[in-house]
Amino acid sequence: MTVDEEGFPKQSKVFEGNVSEPGTLKDILDGLKKEDGMFSNDRTIVMDAGIATEENIALIRKSGYKYVVVSRKKSFEDTFWPETDEEKIMLSDGKTTLGMKLVRTEEEAFLLCHSEAKEAKEAKEKSILSLKEQRFEEALSAIKEGLEKPKRQKKYDTIIERIGRLKERYKVGNLYTIKVEQTDGKATDIKFKKNAQAQAKEEAIGTYVLRTNRLDLSGEEISKLHRSLSTVEESFKTMKGNLGLRPNFHHTDTPTIAHVHVTVLAYHILAGILKS
């Protein structure tokens, strides 16, 4: 669904299931251009990190649109950001403070945001992640210790398979660099440590980076544009539960699309309420 700067829906489309989210952007941009003057090239596309691949950002530029997106890049050099204190603004809920640092280059502006509300939410998620990491490391250590004990499996291929199953079970394997040493097809040692991705994930709690080619905007204006996307996302998240959009038990396309559009129609009403 595409909305205007006021949050009102302008068009919507249901894609086939199991379609890669980044791959849908071209269809969306083509749809924008077909709108009879509703969207012009001075419009700004606001997207989350799921769609904001480098290829898609290049596609937006080629299409002549501006963009505000959540950067997929998680870590920046400390020297990239100014040494000045964060500029702080109070969000519309009157309770949450957002800290910001803005950097402009010749082609883009980058806004480092620190959200107290996001930090509180991610702190809970981090505790769950830490428990998974602890259990993953304990399981790796148990396999490693078994390499020094008699009658334990030491075949290299089997050890690799066991580590693969641990990665699948705990979903944190991408945060570790793991090296299995071998001699004549038998594993002799397992070395593991957290990698740069894990460090960036731990340091980024409560923070995110927005990037845009709207060099005319202030940090607060960039953040406000991005929050318009958050409003839509939160609205649909709520309605999916309250309106029963999911789970969807239909078996053919027509009732499935009709079911989805109940929520789209509900958002039309909600947009007016939010604006009033």
Image (cartoon, rainbow, N blue to C red):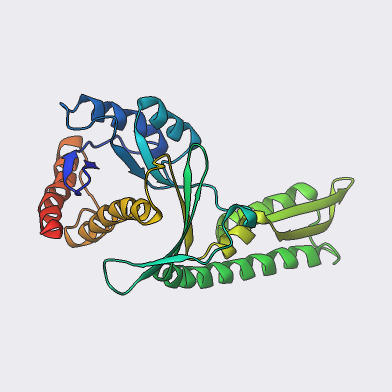
Q: Note whether 54 is above or below 151 in the view shown.
A: above
Question: Horizontal placement of 164 versus 39: left or right?
Answer: right
Is residue 94 at all visible to an observer of this figure?
A: yes
Residue drawn at the location 36% of the way across and 57% of the way down:
220
Residue drawn at the location 68% of the way across and 66% of the way down:
137
Q: How many marks?
A: 0
Where residue 236 appears, as percent x and y from the top left, is: 24, 54
Residue drawn at the location 30% of the way across and 34% of the way down:
16
Where residue 218 appears, as percent x and y from the top left, is: 38, 52
**In the image shown, does 220 or 160 lie closer to the viewer?**
220
**In the image shown, does 151 or 71 lie closer to the viewer?**
71
Q: Quadrant of residue 237?
A: bottom left
Where residue 93 appears, as percent x and y from the top left, is: 26, 70
Is residue 165 at all visible to an observer of this figure?
A: no
Residue lying farthest to the right in this orientation: 184
Specify the quadrant that holds the C terminus: bottom left
Where residue 24 appears, as percent x and y from the top left, is: 35, 33
Residue drawn at the location 15% of the way across and 44% of the way down:
261
Q: Note whether 101 is above or below 43 in the view shown.
A: below
Specify the quadrant that holds the N terminus: top left
**In the image shown, does 58 or 237 lie closer to the viewer?**
58
**In the image shown, does 74 or 6 lie closer to the viewer?**
6
Question: Horizontal placement of 251 versus 104: left or right?
Answer: left
